[in-house]
Structures are given as C-alpha cells and as structure tokens.
C-alpha cells in the first residue's frame, strides 16, 4: 500500500518476510518494509484473528507486532532492518515457544 | 558519573529532551538521555541526521530543516545518549528500568525530565482497525524515515495543522491525494477568531497555514468540508470508505489507504505511573501534568518538558526543556537561584511567544463531538477488541469508572495499555453516567510502561538487598 520514492542503491539490505527475500534500506523500520508488501498486514489479533497493520508508526499502538529472528511480539515500527533479518507475520495469540 | 548513575535522566530525545540535555551539560550536570528511537530528533525531526545528507531535506520544509543543528548540538553536548531504549518503570529515588536489545537493566539519577512528547489523539470509528487505515503522523514518519508514500492516491480525513503540512509535503514528494475529508465543524472559524488578537505575534505561522491551504486548493483534489462521520469497510483490508457531513451529504469512495488525524495529546503514562498530579485541560481536551513554572511535577525532582507538558509544538518544547534543566541545575547545587532566574527570563519569553497562537489553533481544531462518541459497533479498545456498545452497556450498570470497566471488559488491558482507548473510555463513561469527563479520570497506570518479557526481566543483573 506504500511505495519507496528512491532506490537505496548501496544501502540495500535483504530481509526475509515469511521466508521470502525482500529488499530494504539500511536504517528504515521493519514496519516501513511491511507496508510496502502486497499482503498489507503483519499480524492477526489474539481475540478475533482479524488482520492488522501498522497504525501509528511511533510505538504507541502495538498493532505492528511481528516475530523478528524468533522473538515474538516485537514492535516492528521501532525495529530497524538488519541484513539477513527474519521477519514472520504473527498469527493470533503468541505461543510460549515464540 | 558511574556507568549506572547520572545527575539527570532525560527520557526522550526530541526537541525538549535535546534542549534540556544541552543546557544541563552546560551547567556541569552528568546527563543520560534514553529514547525509543534509533536516532535523535523525536517525531518532528525523525531521521533528521540521515535525511540531512540527501536532497529530500528541501522538500520537507523549514521547520524540519531546523532539526539539523539541534541534533548536532545534542550529539556534541556530552550527554550519555542511549537510543532504542524503552523505559518501563521508574522507582522513587530514582531508579529507572530500561530494555535495549532484549536486555533489561536499571540506572539511577537524582532528577528526571520526562520529555516523552505527544501521540496522535485516537480517532475511533467503524473500521479504523482495518489494514490501510493509519494516522497522518504515521504516514509522515514513513515519508521522513523511509521516503515512502501511499502507492495510490490517498484519502485523508481530519483537521489540524498536521494534515495540511503532510499533504503539502506529500505533493512536493510526488505523492497523490484522492481527497481531503475536512472534519472541522461548521462555525469553528468564528469561535477561534476571538483568540486571534493574542496570536497575531505569530503572523508568520498564520501566513504559513494559509499558504498551505491555498496551495492544496490549487492542487485540485476534492476537499469535502464539515465531515462528521466516517466508516471504513473492507475484507481484511481497507477497500472503501463512507463519509457523512454535518448537513447530511454522504459519499462512498474506493480507498486503499486512509490517513486520519484529530490533533495530538500529551503522553502521560510515565507521569501517571510516577504518581504525578494531572489536571484536565479543557482547551486541549486531554489530561496534562500539573507543573510549576519550571516544569516540575507534584513529585519533587520529576519534571515534564515538551508536548508532554501540554501541546505547544517544538518551539515551545525547547524553552520548556531548558527551563527544566536550569531548575535541576539549581536543585543539584550547580547554579545559583538568581542566575537561574536570569537565564529563565528569555526562555519564558520564547515560550510565551511560541504558545501565543495555540488558543486559536485549539479552538479552531477542537475535536468534533463524534470523536468521543463512536457508534456502538466501533472497536474502542483495539488490543482487546471491546466495542463502544459493550462499554456503554456496562457503564450503565452501577456507576463503574474506567478501572472497573477495564476489569469487566479487558478494555485497556492489552499491550498498548490504554494509549488508544483511554480518552474514548472516559468520554463514554461520562456520557452514560452524565458526569463531567474531568471527574471520570483515566486508567490507573502501573508498571511496566511497555511490555517486558520474562526473558528480559531475568536478564536484570540485580540482587535483592539482604533482609
């Protein structure tokens, strides 16, 4: 639903979203990258399992939660991308193993 | 200064926090600044250091560009700066608990300045939880930090200076606007005008606001005035939106992204958790901490500066930060009272100039009544998915306050801890029980201020003192 206006060039890193490699720019947030993906959502809610996407981008709404490198419920708007990072859309309740 | 202890702990590295740090360092205090973000600047100057080196700086405007020097001065001031650190508890004395990179630790300080800024006022309406509905502030952060704009022409709904600024920046960046649903109610200009004389000192800002409005009119997208009701619809994502104006005109339009904004409110979770007294600000429709003329709260040595002290913008945030730092320097014996008073005089003059236009803006852009009275089907608590209808039913049974309703319904119990539903809850309780909203109050805020994992807690390298 969003698009990037410039090509990051040498600042390009690769993150894996649900296993799929995606280009990102060093320093931008995981949430910004997620909002450029065609799926347009990053988690389903624990209560009704409805889809949610980043809403505030400043750390107060907690809608942008994802799993990052195996750690669950990470605020993707506060997390800068790293090359090789693994991001997983979060489904429903967080399990004890995540 | 040990690794764990500083004279002053500043929470937040926006305009107020940075200005406070620079001033405190100048008076010889050791200073630690912790901040959620990965770089200094707060929300107004997000990513300023990165963007400064690019051609994008020019199209984000003068007010944004001003952050370049501020961030540089902050970097050079000698404060211990800890980015990407979340504060989740402050104990008296003071001991603050932080999480960074999945590890928790505690630090101590003699005084605290909370410069945690503001958040956008939650705007609940049916469908506001659908992917594709974001705040205008969120879109502006995406523009500043990721040079990203909505892929298709975007709908924007709301009122206030921020939507006008963002639309101007978006057009300059090559983005496209499908339409602006202006929610300013009819008759507001007249009500605001009586505050104009005192705001005339801010003539430049008035001209800037008018020039944005004129440029947006010329851009040719539809501007629909006096929009009172919104409804977002779609299956798992925003597909269309419905609006209704005060005089009953209705419309249905296709939409992929809808950006909403109804002003900003102070972040008061940290002062509330510390037991600082707050009061209701009828002009800004929110709680603000009760502060003395230096920004000190009802708790000694705890200060609030910046928009967290009441919405005033970056130009008010900086003098507020410096005033708080001057007072901390005095209290810690680094600055004489008369020297602090002399240094405070120009800061107070700057602050009062910066706030001169605020009553006009507050009156013009006061939230429309529907913001506080969403339709029954609206999810008020986004985290726990509690509807306005359920809260209304429960609020009528006995005379529960927000904390009882939280226990009954789980509203306010999710990870955002009431940051999105607190004010809506208060207004629903007030309306159902026919009480003034200032009497209803807010949720009781308890630690942790941000969710902490058991793993992070276990990483705290601390021993309980022997009994």
Image (cartoon, rainbow, N blue to C red):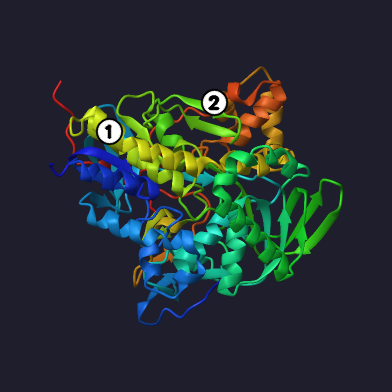
Q: Chain of mark 2?
A: B
Chain under numbered label 1: B
- Report x, y in % for residue B207: 61, 56
Residue at screen point 35% across, 50% down: B13
Whether residues under marks 2 and 1 lie with C-beta atoms below 8 angstroms apart, the answer is no
Q: Say left or right for B355 vs B388.
A: left
> On the image, numbered disc 1 is attached to which residue?
B340
Q: Residues within 10 Å of mark 2 (few under 14, many from 20)?
A: some
For the point 27% across and 51% down, which residue is it?
B82
Q: Quadrant of residue B340?
A: top left
Q: How many marks?
A: 2
Q: In the figure, residue B330 lies in which quadrant?
A: top left
Identify the residue under disc 2: B403
Q: Depth check: B98 or B344 in front? A: B344
Image coordinates for residue B256, horizontal then vertical, percent: 67, 65
Q: Nearer the viewer, residue B112 or B207?
A: B207
Q: From the image, which quarter does the C terminus of chain B lie in?
A: top left
Describe the element under mark 2 as helix, strand or loop. helix
Q: Secondary structure at mark 1?
A: helix
Left or right of residue A39: residue B321: left
Mark-to-mark CA distance, 2 and 1: 42 Å
As drawn, which residue projects farthest toward the top?
B398
Q: Can the viewer see residue B90 in this picture?
A: yes
Q: Is residue B253 above or below residue B376?
A: below
Residue in the image at 36% along x and 62% along y: B68
Image coordinates of residue B113 in percent, x first then y, are: 33, 37
Q: Quadrant of the N terminus of chain B?
A: top left
Q: Nearer the viewer, residue B270 or B31?
A: B31
Is residue A43 in view from this perspective?
no
């Amino acid at each position: 639903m969003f698009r990037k206006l410039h090509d990051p060039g040498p600042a390009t890193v690769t993150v894996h979203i649900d296993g799929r490699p995606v280009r990102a720019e060093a320093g931008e947030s995981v949430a910004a990258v997620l909002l450029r993906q065609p799926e347009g959502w990053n988690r389903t809610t624990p209560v009704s399992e409805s889809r949610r996407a980043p809403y505030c981008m400043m750390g107060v709404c907690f809608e942008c939660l994802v799993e990052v490198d195996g750690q669950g419920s990470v605020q993707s708007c506060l997390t800068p991308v790293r090359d090789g990072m693994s991001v997983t859309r979060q489904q429903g309740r967080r399990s004890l193993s995540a | 200064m040990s690794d764990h202890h500083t004279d002053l702990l500043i929470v937040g590295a926006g305009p107020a926090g940075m200005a406070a740090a620079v001033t405190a360092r100048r008076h010889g205090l050791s200073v630690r600044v912790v901040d959620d973000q990965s770089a200094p600047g707060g929300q107004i100057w997000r990513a300023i250091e990165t963007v400064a080196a690019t051609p994008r700086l020019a199209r984000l405007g003068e007010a944004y560009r001003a952050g370049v020097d501020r961030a540089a001065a902050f970097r050079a001031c000698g404060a211990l700066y800890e980015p990407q650190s979340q504060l989740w508890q402050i104990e008296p004395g003071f001991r603050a608990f932080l999480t960074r990179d999945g590890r928790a630790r505690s630090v101590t300080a003699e005084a605290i300045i909370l410069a945690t800024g503001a958040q956008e006022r939650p705007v609940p309406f049916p469908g506001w939880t659908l992917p594709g509905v974001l705040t205008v502030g969120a879109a502006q952060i995406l523009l500043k930090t990721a040079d990203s704009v909505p892929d298709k022409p975007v709908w924007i709904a709301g009122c206030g200076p921020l939507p006008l600024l963002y639309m101007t920046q978006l057009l300059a960046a090559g983005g496209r606007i499908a339409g602006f649903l202006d929610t300013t109610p009819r008759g507001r200009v007249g009500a605001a005008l009586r505050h104009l004389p005192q705001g005339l000192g801010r003539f430049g800002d008035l001209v800037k606001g008018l020039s944005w409005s004129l440029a947006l009119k010329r851009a040719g997208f539809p501007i629909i005035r006096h929009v009172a009701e919104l409804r977002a619809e779609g299956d798992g994502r925003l597909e269309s939106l419905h609006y209704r104006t005060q005089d009953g005109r209705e419309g249905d339009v296709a939409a992929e992204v809808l950006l909403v904004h109804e002003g900003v409110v102070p972040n008061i979770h940290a002062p509330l958790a510390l037991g600082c007294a707050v009061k209701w600000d009828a002009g800004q429709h929110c709680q603000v901490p009760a502060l003395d003329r230096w920004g000190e709260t009802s708790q000694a040595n705890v200060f609030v500066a910046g928009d967290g002290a009441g919405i005033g913008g970056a130009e008010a945030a900086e003098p507020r930060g410096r005033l708080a730092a001057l007072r901390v320097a005095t209290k810690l014996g680094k600055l004489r009272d008369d020297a602090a008073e002399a240094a405070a005089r120009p800061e107070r003059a700057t602050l009062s100039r910066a706030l001169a236009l605020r009553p006009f803006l507050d009156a013009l852009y006061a939230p429309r009544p529907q913001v506080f009275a969403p339709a029954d089907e609206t999810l008020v608590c986004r985290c726990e998915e509690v509807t306005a209808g359920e809260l209304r039913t429960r609020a009528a049974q006995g005379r529960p306050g927000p904390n009882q309703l939280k226990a009954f319904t789980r509203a306010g119990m999710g990870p955002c801890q009431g940051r999105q539903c607190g004010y809506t809850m208060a207004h629903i309780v007030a309306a159902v029980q026919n009480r003034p909203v200032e009497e209803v109050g807010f949720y009781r805020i308890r630690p942790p201020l941000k969710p902490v994992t058991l793993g992070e807690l276990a990483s705290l390298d601390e021993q309980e003192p022997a009994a």
